[in-house]
Amino acid sequence: MTKQIITAVLLVAGLATFVGLGVWQLQRLDWKQTVLDEIEAQIAGEAEPLPANPTPEAHRYQPVAIAGRMETGELHVLVSSRDYGAGFRIIAPFTTEDGRRILIDRGFVLNEAKGAERSTGVMSLEGNLHWPDERDGYTPDDDPEGNWWYARDVSKMAATLNTDPVLVIARTSTDPGIKALPVTTEGIPNDHAEYAMTWFLMAATWVGMTGFALWRIRRRNVGVRGPDQGELSR
C-alpha cells in the first residue's frame, strides 16, 4: 500500500508539473504573437525621414524614406531564399541628400547575377532600419577580398564601405535585376506551440508510465496475498 501511495503522489505531482509547463508555454505563445503583431505593424508603418542618430534600441524596424545617390561598390552576402534558391544579398553604399553615407540592403540576386552591373546614381527608396544578428559560432569567416560575406555585420560592412553603421533594408525596388527582400517577422522564432505540445505529451506519457507502475504494484500485492478465502473454500 505504501508503494501505491507514493506512486500515486508522484503521478499527481508529475502531471501537475508537465501540464503547468504546457499551459505556461501557451501563455508565452499568446505573448509572443502579440509582440510579433506589434513588430509587423511597425514594419508596415508609414515611412519617415531617416533619424539623425538611429540606434538599434530605439529605431530597429523603423520605416524610412530616403533620397540621394546609390554609389558604386557593393558587398555580396551569401543567403538561401526559400522562394528563389541560393544567391546573394546586395549591400551597397548610399549617400543621402544631406550628405550622410549609409548602407542599403538592395535585395537578392541569384548566383549567376553576382557580378552583373546594377543601377546606381540618383534615386529614392523606402525601407526599414535594421541591425541583423546573424553571426554565431558556426558562421564562417567573411572573405572581404573575394567579396564573400556570410552575415550582415553592420559595423564590419560599414567599415569596409566607409559608411555610417546604419543599414536600411529596401522594401521598394532599386534595380530591375534585384528582388527586394523586405524585413519581415519570419526570422523571429515562435516555437511556443511546439514546446507546449511537448509538455502535454510528456504529461500523457507520465500518466501512462505511472499508471502501469500502479497496476504492476497491485498485481504484485495480489500475488503475495494469494487467493482469497472464497477461492480456498472451493
Image: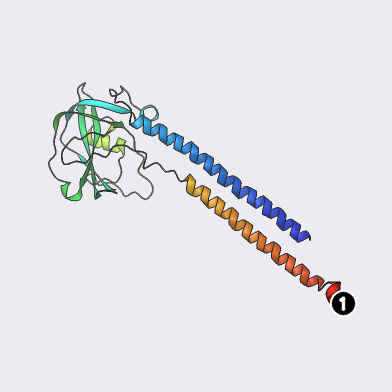
Q: In the rendered image, which quarter is residue 98 located in?
A: top left
Residue 140, above or below 69: below
Helix, strand or loop status at disc 1: helix
Residue 15: x and y in percent read 64, 51
- Can residue 38 be spotted in the picture? yes
Residue 221: x and y in percent read 77, 68
Q: Is residue 165 left or right of residue 214?
A: left
Q: Nearer the viewer, residue 127 or 139?
A: 127
- Can residue 145 be spotted in the picture? no
Residue 60, above or below 203: above
Q: Is residue 231 left or right of residue 13?
A: right
Q: Is residue 33 left or right of residue 207?
A: left
Q: Nearer the viewer, residue 112 or 85?
A: 85
Tell me the quadrant of the picture where the C terminus can be found. bottom right
Residue plotted at (60% across, 50% down)? 18
Residue 188: x and y in percent read 40, 41
* Disc 1 residue type (three-letter): Ser
Write down the residue under mark 1: 233
Q: Name, please, the residue furthest toward the front.
A: 234
Q: Is residue 191 left or right of residue 165?
A: right
Residue 234, above or below 47: below
